[in-house]
Amino acid sequence: MDEFTDKTTAINQMWQTDFTYFKIIGWGWYYLSTILDDYSRYIIAWKLCTNMQAEDVTSTIELALQASGCDQAVVRHKPRLLSDNGSCYISGDLAKWLTDQKMDHVRGAPFHPQTQGKIERWHQTMKNRVLLENYYLPGDLEQQIGAFVDYYNNQRYHESLNNVTPADVYFGRDKAILREREKIKKLTIRQRRLQHQKQAA
């Protein structure tokens, strides 16, 4: 199970966030902060950080607010943030910043990573690809992460999204794609029936 208890019904209702880490040879550990849209699995923003502090979280959220347009005054409800109970997520600084932004914050049950299953799955998928190489410069790692985010958002079909991409769902293209597929499927079935009838005759 990788769903939060309240299932989202639209984009930007809830964002999952988490850190994962990478070793850069000669530089030490770097931490990737990501914001993933719960409904579409679209990676809205990410940032490679040298720490896992509240300000690293807020700067990634700021990137996501700008990228999604949720920083505009016309937005009625800002996304809820779903995180684990890591020290940067339970800090008073983050709580104050989120209050100022009028954003709610939900934390998963301790020792129950399945609550943030979508972002955990994203980390696993991304690391399986990105960690095939060694990295000697932070810029090289950033480049690889950026390329994989682009692939994940725009080219990788998700079974849980009816085999469309996160970008298709996030930008509202999925319904038209699925309708077109259904039309092609019906046409193919009709053509096959005609072929069978001809062969039978």
Image (cartoon, grey):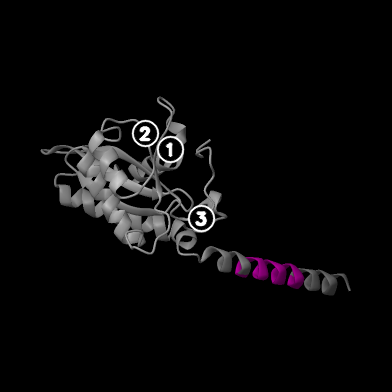
Identify the residue position indicated by label 3 in the image: 10
* Circle 1 SS class: helix
Magenta part of the protein: which range? Answer: 180-191
Identify the residue position indicated by label 2 in the image: 84
* Circle 2 SS class: loop
Image-based side of 195 in relation to 76, left or right: right
**Can you give x and y, in whole percent of width and height, for residue 156 in the image?**
45, 55
Task: Identify the mark nearer the N-term, 1 or 2.
Answer: 2
Label the magenta part by its dominant secondary structure.
helix
Q: Amino acid at mark 3?
A: Ala
Q: Is residue 124 above or below residue 41?
A: above
Q: Which of label 1 and label 3 is nearer to you?
A: 3
**Can you give x and y, in whole percent of width and height, for residue 176 in the image?**
57, 69
Q: Using a 10 Å C-alpha cutoff, classify the residue at mark 3 as few (fewer than 14 neighbours), some (14 to 19) or many (20 or more).
A: some
Residue 80 belongs to magenta span: no
* Circle 3 SS class: loop
Task: Identify the mark nearer the N-term, 1 or 3.
Answer: 3
**Can you give x and y, in whole percent of width and height, for residue 27 in the image?**
11, 39
Front-most of residues 2 and 94 = 94
